Image: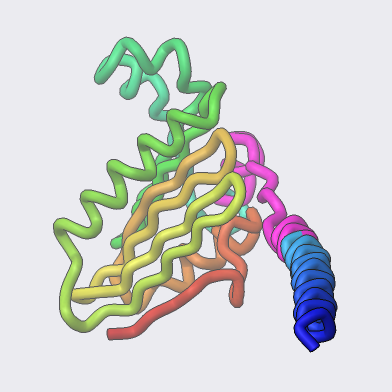
Amino acid sequence: MPKSNNKQKSDNANNITRFNVKGFLKLGVFLAFFVLMVWIILKIAVVPKEPVTSEQFYNILVEQGFEPQDITEEYYKFDEDYRSVLIKCLATEKEDIKLVFFEFNNENSPKEIYQQALADIKTKYNAIYKVETDHQVANHSIYTLDSLGKYNIAIYVGNTAISGYCNSENKNEINKILDAIDYLKPGNSKETTE
């Protein structure tokens, strides 16, 4: 009888080992498949935006009834380091609407402009009651804040950045410009209202 019990215990141990190996193999295959599916979904969903040139932005502003001004030299005077990175800076102002567009020769400088604009917006206009959009994917970030009667934007796409503001009732004017250059698409962002 002891031999039979030993053989039975040995068979049980072998079955458990086979079950564990099969279970681990199935789990490994499932995890590999899951990681692959997540990677594919992210690759499809995270499509970089194509930045516009300063010339394209200028033309869109004119089409929308704005009078853009080249203020690149002002930035060069403000900081000599801009000469090596800033290609063009355009600004437009009409009534309460103000927009500034930057085109750089790299993708780091727009992020710095974006961060400065974002900090300025959050410091001045962050309030309890607001509508805020924060969208960060691939080569772009879009931040909008509608609060305290002002609509503010901070955006970077590739080697470009845009900052601006207007009274809340005129935000559609800014959004039409951003839609025309494909920098602000409805449904692409996470919007929260507090």
Taking 56 as reference, is 80 left or right?
left
Can you say whether 140 is above or below 26 in the image?
above
Residue 77 placement: quadrant: top left
Residue, x 27% and y 85% (percent of image)? 194
Residue 70 placement: quadrant: top left
Residue 35 placement: quadrant: bottom right
The x, y position of residue 66, in whole percent, is 49, 52
Check residue 70 for magenta coloring.
no
Residue, x 47% and y 68% (percent of image)? 173
Q: Main secondary structure of the magenta part?
A: helix
The stretch of residues the image draws in magenta is 36-61
- Furthest toward the bottom, the residue is 1
Residue, x 35% and y 73% (percent of image)? 132
The x, y position of residue 149, in whole percent, is 22, 75
Taking 41 as reference, is 71 left or right?
left
The x, y position of residue 82, in whole percent, is 38, 17
Residue, x 54% and y 25% (percent of image)? 106
Question: Is residue 33 at all visible to an observer of this figure?
Answer: no
